[in-house]
Image (cartoon, rainbow, N blue to C red):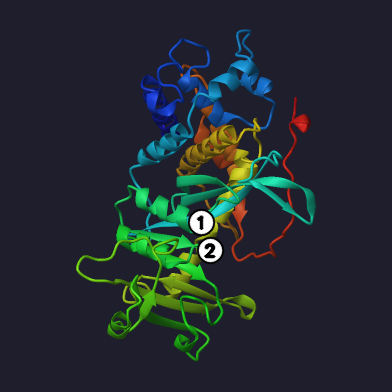
Amino acid sequence: MNYSNQLKMKLFDIMDEMASAPSPFVVNPNKDFTRKRKLDFATMLKFLLTMNGNSIDKELLEFFDYDESTATCSAFVQQRKKIKISAFLFLLKRFVACKSEFKTFRGYRLLAIDGSKINIPHNPLDVDSYKKDRDCVCGYNLLSLNAIYDLLNRIYIDARIRGVKSDAEKKVCCDMVDESTISEPTIIVADRGYEGYNVFCHTQEKGWKFVIRIRDKRFNSLLLADEYPETEEFDISKPRNLTYSGANEARKSLLYYKRVSNIGGVDISNQEGVDFYTLNLRFVRFKLGAGSYELIVTNLDKNEFSANDIKKIYNMRWGIETSFRELKYSVGLNQFHSKEQSCIEQEILGKLIMYNYCSMITSQVIIEQYEKKLTYQSNFTRAVQICKYLFNLPNDAKPPNIEALIRKYMLPVRNGRSYPRQKKKRILTCFNYRIS
């Protein structure tokens, strides 16, 4: 059995294992999925993972191969409401845990943390996701997806979904770091918005390293104006001693004193026997094209990672931005089949699982590099279609050569390209305009 079929069977085995004891994953453990139905627990998970942008009836017909006993749309809606969001989060983490080998950068796993906004159906009554501005009088609803993404292995490790108004990026980041079971040396890479002493403390307590971009201007809250060197590019270390105390004695005894609040500020407990918490921060500023600069805060050792290494690590962060684009337009994250937020969250997490499944298979395909100017990579959009076909194929059917099919569709790698970000509002596709 080749790798693609082995991966499929591993995912199916996890779903069957969950179906054998579904109590932790259903709303009413004593009632839900206790009767024998066509849409049982495992079948519902498999169906939700592979849904595309068609109507529910057409999706069901294709899933059941146009059998006359195909389940109805009403039956599907009733069954999906019995499944908790935690079932998909559990499936996501268990499936990632099946991967035995991970690519690393100098022995470290590189994990990017970032968020993406997702349009959902209009609902002014949902105060957590509803927004209104001068450009859209009727308002719109947004969900915020915050995720941890393995940059070198191209898989999602964890995710949290919140309404755009209740989203707290730093708090969600700390929660995901605390709950992670990764024991290998790890570097967290993040953009502006995730900088803060609380994030630094939680990452340090986990035993991880961090590389986070901060605002490149003087008088920011992390690097004070009198600490800036005269040179435009620099690499300096500045420790920070955090304390809840405001006593003059503490201020005099600490060289780099920073008073913080334990309410909405830093929630890490103080070290035993002392009244302060020490962070050894390193600030690296380097030049980009067109005369612009970036300022990075990290806790990586200078003796192990140079300023150029820090720049390289941060540039790799762009992989999570690319993955969000692939999620939305290749895997179909923008296409939902419900107006209820809980059902939408099911489909979002289902797309993350399917992204991991397709990415794991695609990463094993060896692309031959011809004697040409450009190098080549797999066409991920075509790879998703091929992997979904394998996923829906019955177990007793002979699978095609998935690796050969993916290898057939290639795209050139064009490094160094940059385009100005286009800021334009995208409207959710209404159910009435779907393919019938």
Q: Position of residue 166 (x, y in %)?
A: 56, 50
Q: Which mark is residue 193?
A: 2
Residue 96 visible within the image: yes
Secondary structure under tag 1 reads helix
Please determine whether, in this image, residue 275 is positioned above or below residue 433.
below
Mark 2 and mark 1 in contact? Answer it, CB < 8 Å: yes
Secondary structure under tag 2 reads loop
Q: Residues within 10 Å of mark 2 (few under 14, many from 20)?
A: some
Specify the farthest residue to the front: 247
Q: Quick one: 224 or 237, which is closer to the camera?
A: 224
Q: Quick one: 316 or 93, which is closer to the camera?
A: 93
Specify the farthest residue to the top: 68
Q: Is residue 45 left or right of residue 425?
A: left
- How many marks do you count on the picture? 2
Which of marks 1 and 2 precedes in the sequence?
A: 1
Q: Quadrant of the C terminus?
A: top right
Please determine whether, in this image, residue 429 is positioned above or below residue 251.
above
Residue 1 visible within the image: no
Disc 1 marks which amino acid?
Glu
Please determine whether, in this image, residue 68 is positioned above or below residue 363.
above
Disc 2 marks which amino acid?
Gly
Residue highlighted by disc 1: 169
Q: Residues within 10 Å of mark 1 (few under 14, many from 20)?
A: many
Q: Position of residue 340 (x, y in %)?
A: 62, 33
Q: Position of residue 214 (x, y in %)?
A: 51, 71
Q: Is residue 268 left or right of residue 190?
A: left
